[in-house]
Image (cartoon, coloured by chain):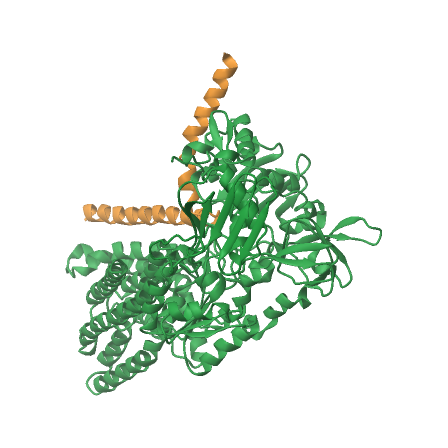
Chain colours: A green, B orange
């Protein structure tokens, strides 16, 4: 059967609900409306760039009423002057060129918008509008109506204008300018021709080189001096010390050489070194700007909410201004920002943000509702028990782990090496100096400086940034998004992996029921649905939700045999459903999957298969990981699934159930006290504490654009089974780094042999330094790509 | 002697000019970074492909009007 796809959003169209318009088929009225808006405004090109680029617009009535409040608007705007307002909105749906096109043509849809500009990597649109002709609220509603609902949260409220740090790019630019020009000017002297012409201009060339080296030395390389100074003060010998030392010695010696006419100096090598090292830094700075790894509850919470004041009127109130005793109105799909008591008769609250559990929990009047839940269905009213900062969920963030941002928790591999490298280098330089002092003082000084210059660990410092930067890129293509290069190093050390259960090793997707057998007609479905209505068996409930709505009919006879199935009789026919024994239908291999068999009017039709809700490849992944790691499953649920999990997973997997968020955190802490390096894999806010406490916190996300708690890495759920690859790959990356350390040390040895014997000419330095850097960089790039292919 | 002096002058001029040109490029680069051109290196590459499409739709519009 050919399934039509919606022209707007591309999802499969359910035949009955198909909407035809303008000879195109749509899955629902919402999609059709968006198409109508675009066609009326001559914006049909939207569909030319990408096939089915849209999203179904969601109902957002009343959700953004707080945008009427001037105070809130002012906080959200980037710029505001008289009529001109500029706002940047985060739109998770931005994903293709069509999105860019339509969002940059907003002025055709709304009077008052003058320009709009998309920043694709950040998934943001920056809109300039005239506040007398339109309002922020109108713009947000327009965006919502065309399927590009912006995401506005409490986070937007506090971060005003962020200053972008572009200093590294400036530094690289200036370093390159100095390096390039000095190279050109140094060239004549490399050939050491004692010609009249060159001798004539030697002074001019040299002093020009000196002048050109100044910006590179004082500005571009400044970061290394600062870092070296800091590390000396804190008593840790990091790699920046020999680098800074090398650069400074190089500069001083070269200046002396030029001033006294001893030679041309090492300014070419110096600027080249600075440029390459800054390039390495830039390369390592791979960021996924559309993802945020530092989220806390503020990213989830709305800015404002509707409050019912004493006289019964609705008013918008800022979330931080909510106090105990307030009555709040929570609409469909709105997040409850504070703990409270339900006043309305009943509500259905989705705690998927908090627990990862997608099934909404039913609450009755007088029940306690917790912050972080999302109301589904009609409007509810709650009475506030605690303010935002005192609510249960937000309290979790006051735990210590969230306070100290664990930045320097680990020593990087390069710093570890330099702990041995730096003292060794200094010892060598001094020994050689002492040796030469007895021969000749000038040579002794030359040798001393030459050693520090040539041993300046440029290649060593480049190794890790280039390897890890490349690894981050390769992993990004495979939908593993790591926060920074440090995470790769930490991943390689992991020996214990802790998994959350719900949402992490199981899926949240509801399409876990499939039908197999002869096709069922509408009458069959109607009978089936009505039969299921009468049953309370969990499988019946799930199947009932799965079958589309049908007309209600009353049964003549209904019989449920516990543990077997249901037999029900209607005027239209009879339905028998249940286990294969009950239907006396023996199919092949039934025990592995959960099935409900269906027979209508005594004829066997087929079966509904309840697919295992565990993620694909879970068993293989665990078997693979168990080889090198200790595995733990840490679940907030009861141990109902213990038996299934024990059967599926490797025997030494530890299963722990009934864990509250803070208990999860403590569990990880316990493991760490046994000096284990723990990786936590989780998904919901209930794992937030554990994720922060663990050495590496990885979040599994069905949709990486949707919000996930603070972590070190985000993995697309479809790549779950590749976690083993991630572990192997990070270990291989570290191997690559070690090997190239050896390679660069070899270069250093060659250079040092020149230096110690007092034969280091500027030409030798100018050849060895770039050569070693290029060898090392190409080596690590080739190796990391090779390992990525070798899955 | 005169020939040599001339040559000397040319070198000074040439090098001054070459450095000057390089400084202009450096300045242009810094200005470009400052204006935020390097903050988003993806969207402009897509955006530049749109212009043709826009012109086409505008043409259609004017066609309709003239008819």
Residue at (72, 47) in percent of width and height: A69
Where does the C terminus of chain A fall, quadrant-wise? Answer: bottom left
Q: Please tell me which residue lies in front, A678 or A577.
A: A577
- A737 w.r.t. B59: above or below: below
The answer to whether residue A213 of the structure is visible from this angle is no
Considering depth in this image, is A292 or A82 the residue closer to the camera?
A292
x, y percentage for residue A49? Answer: 41, 35
Q: Nearer the viewer, residue B41 or A321?
A: A321
In percent of width and height, residue A451 lies at 25, 76
Residue at 26 percent across and 58 percent down: it is A785
Note whether A197 is above or below B60 in the view shown.
below
The answer to whether A624 appears left or right of A47 in the picture is left
User: Residue at coordinates 51% horizontally, 64% vertically from top-left?
Assistant: A710
Q: Is residue A413 above or below residue A60?
A: below
Residue A675 position by quadrant: bottom left
Q: Quadrant of the N terminus of chain A?
A: top left
The answer to whether residue A131 shows anywhere in this view is yes
Residue A663, image x and y in percent?
55, 75
The residue drawn where x is 55% and y is 50% is A532
Q: Can you name the residue that lies furthest to the top here?
A: B67
Marker count (numbered): 0
Residue farthest to the right, as pictured: A311
Q: Position of residue A73 (x, y in %)?
A: 67, 48
From the viewer's side, name the closer residue of A543 and A264: A543
């Amino acid at each position: 059967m050919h399934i039509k796809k919606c022209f707007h959003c591309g999802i499969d169209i359910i035949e009955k609900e198909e909407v035809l318009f303008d000879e195109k088929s749509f899955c629902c009225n919402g999609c059709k409306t968006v198409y109508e808006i675009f066609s009326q405004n001559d914006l049909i090109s939207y569909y030319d760039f990408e096939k089915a680029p849209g999203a179904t617009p969601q109902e957002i009535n009343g959700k953004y009423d707080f945008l009427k409040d001037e105070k809130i608007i002012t906080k959200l705007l980037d710029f505001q002057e008289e009529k001109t307002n500029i706002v940047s909105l985060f739109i998770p749906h931005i994903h293709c060129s069509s999105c860019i096109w339509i969002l940059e043509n907003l002025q055709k849809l709304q009077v008052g918008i003058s320009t709009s500009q998309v920043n694709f990597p950040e998934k943001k649109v920056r809109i300039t509008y005239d506040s007398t002709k339109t309002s922020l609220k109108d713009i947000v509603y327009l965006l919502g109506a065309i399927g590009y609902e912006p995401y506005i949260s409490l986070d937007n409220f506090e971060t005003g204008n962020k200053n972008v740090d572009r200093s590294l790019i400036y530094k690289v630019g200036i370093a390159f300018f100095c390096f390039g020009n000095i190279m050109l000017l140094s060239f004549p002297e490399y050939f050491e021709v004692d010609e009249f012409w060159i001798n004539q201009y030697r002074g001019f060339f040299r002093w020009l080189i000196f002048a050109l080296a100044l910006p590179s030395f004082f500005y571009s390389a400044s970061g290394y001096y600062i870092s070296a100074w800091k590390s000396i003060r804190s008593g840790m010998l990091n790699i920046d010390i020999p680098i800074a030392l090398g650069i400074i010695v190089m500069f001083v010696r070269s200046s002396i050489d030029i001033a006294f006419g001893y030679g041309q100096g090492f300014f070419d090598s110096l600027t080249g070194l600075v440029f390459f090292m800054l390039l390495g830094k830039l390369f390592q700075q791979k960021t996924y700007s559309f993802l945020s790894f530092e989220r806390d509850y503020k990213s989830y919470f709305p800015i404002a909410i509707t409050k019912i004041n004493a006289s019964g009127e609705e008013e918008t109130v800022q979330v931080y201004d909510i106090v105990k005793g307030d009555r709040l109105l929570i609409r469909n799909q709105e997040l409850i920002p504070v703990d409270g008591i339900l006043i309305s008769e009943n509500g259905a609250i989705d705690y998927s943000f908090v627990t990862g559990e997608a099934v909404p929990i039913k609450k009755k009047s007088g029940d306690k509702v917790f912050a972080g839940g999302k109301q589904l269905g009609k409007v509810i009213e709650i009475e506030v028990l605690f303010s935002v900062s005192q609510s249960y969920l937000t309290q979790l963030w006051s735990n210590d782990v969230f306070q100290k941002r664990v930045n320097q928790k680990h020593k990087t591999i390069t710093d570890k090496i330099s702990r041995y490298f730096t003292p060794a280098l200094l010892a060598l330089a001094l020994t050689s100096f002492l040796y030469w002092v007895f021969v000749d003082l000038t040579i002794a000084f030359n040798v001393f400086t030459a050693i520090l210059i040539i041993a300046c660990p440029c290649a060593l410092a480049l190794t890790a940034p280039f390897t890890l930067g490349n690894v981050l890129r390769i992993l990004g293509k495979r939908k593993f998004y790591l926060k920074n290069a440090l995470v790769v190093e930490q991943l390689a050390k992991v020996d214990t992996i802790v998994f959350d259960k719900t949402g992490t090793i199981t899926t949240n997707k509801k399409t876990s029921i499939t039908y197999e057998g002869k096709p069922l007609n509408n009458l069959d479905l109607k009978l089936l649905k009505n039969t299921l209505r009468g049953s309370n068996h969990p499988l019946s409930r799930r199947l009932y939700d799965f079958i589309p709505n049908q007309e209600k009919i009353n049964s003549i006879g209904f019989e449920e045999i516990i543990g077997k199935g249901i037999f029900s009789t209607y005027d239209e026919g009879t339905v028998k459903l249940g286990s294969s024994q009950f239907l006396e239908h023996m199919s092949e291999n039934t025990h592995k999957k959960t099935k409900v068999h269906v027979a209508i009017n005594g004829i066997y039709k087929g079966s509904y298969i309840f697919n295992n809700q565990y993620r694909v490849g879970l068993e293989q992944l665990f078997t693979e990981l168990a080889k090198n790691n200790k595995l733990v499953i840490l679940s907030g649920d009861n141990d109902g699934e213990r038996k299934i999990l024990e059967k599926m997973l490797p025997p030494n997997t530890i299963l722990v159930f009934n864990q509250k968020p803070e208990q999860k955190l403590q569990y990880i802490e316990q493991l760490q006290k046994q000096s284990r390096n723990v990786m936590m894999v989780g998904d919901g806010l209930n794992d937030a504490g554990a994720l922060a406490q663990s050495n590496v916190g990885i979040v599994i996300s069905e949709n990486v654009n949707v919000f996930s708690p603070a972590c070190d890495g985000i993995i697309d759920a479809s790549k779950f089974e590749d976690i083993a690859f991630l572990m192997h790959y990070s270990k291989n990356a570290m191997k690559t780094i070690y090997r190239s350390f050896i390679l660069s040390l070899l270069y250093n040895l060659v250079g040092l042999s020149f230096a110690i014997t007092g034969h280091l000419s500027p030409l030798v330095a100018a050849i060895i330094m770039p050569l070693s850097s290029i060898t090392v960089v190409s080596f690590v790039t080739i190796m990391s790509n090779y390992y990525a292919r070798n899955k | 002697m005169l020939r040599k002096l001339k040559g000397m002058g040319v070198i000074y001029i040439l090098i001054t000019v070459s450095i000057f040109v390089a400084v202009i490029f450096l300045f242009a680069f810094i200005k470009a970074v400052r204006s935020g051109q390097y903050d988003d290196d993806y969207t402009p590459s897509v955006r530049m492909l749109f212009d043709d499409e826009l012109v086409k739709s505008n043409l259609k519009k004017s066609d309709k009007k003239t008819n």
